[in-house]
Amino acid sequence: MAQLDVDLMEEEHLVARSFTRDISFGGAFVAMKGIPRPALDSKLDLVFKLGDDAHTTKYRVHARVVRETDDGIGLMFKDFDASAFRSLRELLRHKDEFVSTSGVHA
């Protein structure tokens, strides 16, 4: 599966930049090896950017940290509304077209 670059935001402040190792309609696992991670139960926004340099679309999804491992954090999506559903549907439809450009791989 392709990895998606993601910014983890807390109250409009960047917490970390990383990539997803897994994503579904229920949540995502974000690689955080060697990166300071948010605490369990933290509420975050995940911001995904899809496209190329000429045209980029941002997708924002609310989530809560529900799991920690040595490799990263598990997030459960929350406060689902029609806009969040459309964003996730678009991300999942195109996830295999976009490869992480972060240069960080698990």
Image (cartoon, rainbow, N blue to C red):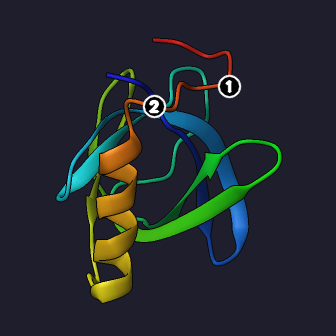
Residue 41 visible in this rendered orientation of the protein:
no
Residue drawn at point x = 64 percent, y = 78 percent: 11
Residue drawn at point x = 37 percent, y = 30 percent: 96
Indicate the quadrant where residue 52 lies. Answer: top right
Q: Report the side of 40 relative to 98 (left or right).
A: left
Residue 88 visible in this rendered orientation of the protein:
yes
Q: Which mark is residue 97?
A: 2
Are there few (<14), some (14-19), or many (20+) residues within 10 Å of tag 2? some
Foreground mark, 1 or 2, reads: 2
Q: Is residue 54 above or below residue 96?
A: below
Instruction: Farthest residue to the top: give it.
Output: 106
Which residue bears the numbered disc 1? 102
Q: Is residue 79 above or below residue 15?
A: below
**74 or 46, nearer to the observer:** 46
Q: Report the side of 36 relative to 40 (left or right).
A: right
Q: Report the side of 41 relative to 19 (left or right).
A: left
> Mark 2 or mark 1, which is nearer the start of the sequence?
2
Specify the quadrant that holds the C terminus: top left
Q: Which mark is residue 66?
A: none
Label 1 to label 2: alpha-carbon separation: 15 Å
Residue 102 percent coordinates (x, y): 68, 25
Residue 95 percent coordinates (x, y): 39, 38
Indicate the quadrant where residue 81 lies. Answer: bottom left
Residue drawn at point x = 50 percent, y = 51 percent: 38
Specify the quadrant that holds the N terminus: top left
Secondary structure state at the residue bearing disc 1: loop
Secondary structure state at the residue bearing disc 2: loop
Three-letter code, disc 2: Glu
Three-letter code, disc 1: Ser
Instruction: Farthest residue to the left: give it.
Output: 26
